[in-house]
Amino acid sequence: MDLQTTIYIVVGLSFSLYIGIAIWARAGSVSEFYAAGGAIGPKMNGMATAADWMSAASFISMAGLIANMGYGGGLFLMGWTGGYVLLAMLLAPYLRKFGKFTVPQFIGDRFYSKSASTLAVVCLLTASITYIIGQMTGVGVAFSRFLGVSSEMGIYIGMAIVFAYAVFGGMKGITYTQVAQYIVLILAYTVPAIFISLQLTGNPIPQLGLGGGYVGTDMTLLQKLDSVVTDLGFGQYTTSVPNNSLLNMFMYTLSLMIGTAGLPHVIMRFFTVPTVKDARSSAGWALIFIALLYTTAPAVAAMAKLNLHATVNSAVKTGGDLYAADASLKNEERPDWMKRWEKTGLLKFEDKNGDGRIQYYNDKTKNEAAKAKMDAAGWKGNELTVNPDIMVMANPEIALLPNWVIALVAAGGLAAALSTAAGLLMAISAAVSHDLVKGVFVPDISEKNELLAGKAAMAVAIVIAGWLGLNPPGFAAGTVALAFGIAASSLFPAIMMGIFSKTMNKEGAMAGMVAGLLVTLFYVFAHKGIFFVKGTEFVDAIGGPNSFFGITPEAIGAVGAMVNFAVAFAVYKVTQPTPSHIQAMVEAVRVPRGSKMVDGAH
């Protein structure tokens, strides 16, 4: 059976499974639509949480960025995993004990203000729609390659599919769908990694293969990779820091970490279990399920990068001269996988020196020894452009693995993007229908009409995100990092102060959210365009790119969070104190004992 037919069968079966589950588990009430009736077990909820949280950025883009950035790409691993621990330990159990469906509902009740709840909805929608843009970018990458359509058509197909099962099933349907999606995506990630680790190191465990020896040499895999990339003018793989700035790396990691803890679609998952104890337990299970992928990612990144160089330059495997005239791959002999990815526009070749061969190197290097070799070889500039988002998806093709493995990766990439998009749509739906329509504008709305409002909100959100996804502000993981920064600067401080400060009042919390959000959006829009619309950037007005101490827009969320905290406490000091009954409520939520009583009270 040929590759394309195998892909159609595997992807088709996985989609049929997801939509079938959504129809089987469709929600019949508001409680089932928003919180799956609070009846999901900890292990299953942990698996669904892992799928919800491991998006296209984790599956498709993260290893590609690590492959590109080397050591510096570890900030994604540290930020996202550390943030999940922060969420599981500091926020989820208390929010579950509070017993509300959504983050805006918590903020509205804790800060005794419908205005605070409405402001939280604005913050949530801004972060969630930005996040979905990243998922749509990933869907476009996966569909364009594996279904043989343009990335634009891929985005339209993805929009239709995720909308179908999110609207059918609500949180109940999404939960069971995400369990299936987790199984698909984790198999799709680990199976190729095991094959490739065996090929390159002789070790079937990728995590150990990363530190193991490179077959046929007395070097380790990482030593070999360091040797190859530095000889070709790239930075040393095991030590390179992004933008040569440790401050930016720290702020980027912090932004991802606290952004994770403020993400509404993940927090909502902890309302789907029966008790506070189950919320803690499902957080632990989710961390185990997440770790399976996150500990494999560095190995996937390094091995994919080494395989890519070995494909383009035969001297990588033989240990010969990388600059020899016959070492570079002849364009006419390039493998089929390169031709397939060229059709997507995500891999490009330009023969700059007219020798009919592909030179892949860093032509902007400051390494004088490498520059001299490049000039002596007659190279006129790098000729291969590889979008980082394709590295994981192309990895099994580069390694010449069986067709069924390539098809499995296609299904896994789509599962990752669609599972998170569904969770985000759920958060948007709940925020609009439950917190805005019912909570503010029409308090006596019927259950039926509330569900209709939620589904309409989903439709509008996916159209907006799909349209923006056609011209994304960056790679999938970079776009998602912007969403984390928005959540970090607006929602995380308000949730933290709501739980751990009995005296923080509504004026302080609201002022902090506005200040944090505006600071972050101003810096992001300066670099990426107003609401990510191309051509509306105003980066020169702020002194040029990364003008604030070299901090990139993806890392500015940490600064926004600091502004949020500072403004909140400054305003709180000069405004009315928090009512005593609110202080008593916060104290009750924080007390470990009597959690069952508090569960029942709410």
Image (spheres, rainbow, N blue to C red):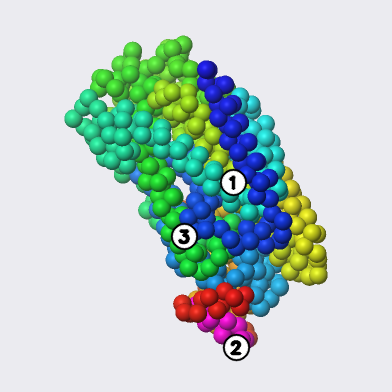
Q: Residue at x 57, y 84 (%)?
A: 583
C-alpha span from label 3 to label 1: 19 Å
For badge 3, the amino acid type reads Ala
Please say whether residue 271 is visible from this viewpoint.
yes
Residue at disc 1, secondary structure: helix
For badge 2, the amino acid type reads Ser
Q: Toward the viewer: 566 or 462?
A: 462
Residues in magenta, as a range = 579-590
Say the numbered circle drawn on residue 580. Answer: 2
Residue at disc 3, secondary structure: helix
Q: Is residue 292 left or right of residue 213?
A: right
The x and y percentages for residue 408 are: 50, 32
Q: Which corner quadrant holds the C terminus? A: bottom right
Q: Is residue 387 left or right of residue 442?
A: left
The x and y percentages for residue 275 are: 53, 68
The residue identified by callout 3 is 283
Say the numbered circle drawn on residue 177. Answer: 1
Q: Toward the viewer: 440 or 481?
A: 440
| Few, some or many residues within 10 Å of mark 1 (<14, 14–19, 20+) | many
Counting residues from the start of the chain, the first of labels 2 and 1 encountered is 1
Q: Residue at x 59, y 46 (%)?
A: 177
The x and y percentages for residue 241 are: 36, 46
C-alpha span from label 2 to label 3: 32 Å
Q: Residue at x 65, y 41 (%)?
A: 19
For badge 1, the amino acid type reads Thr
Q: Residue placed farthest to the bottom in the image?
A: 580
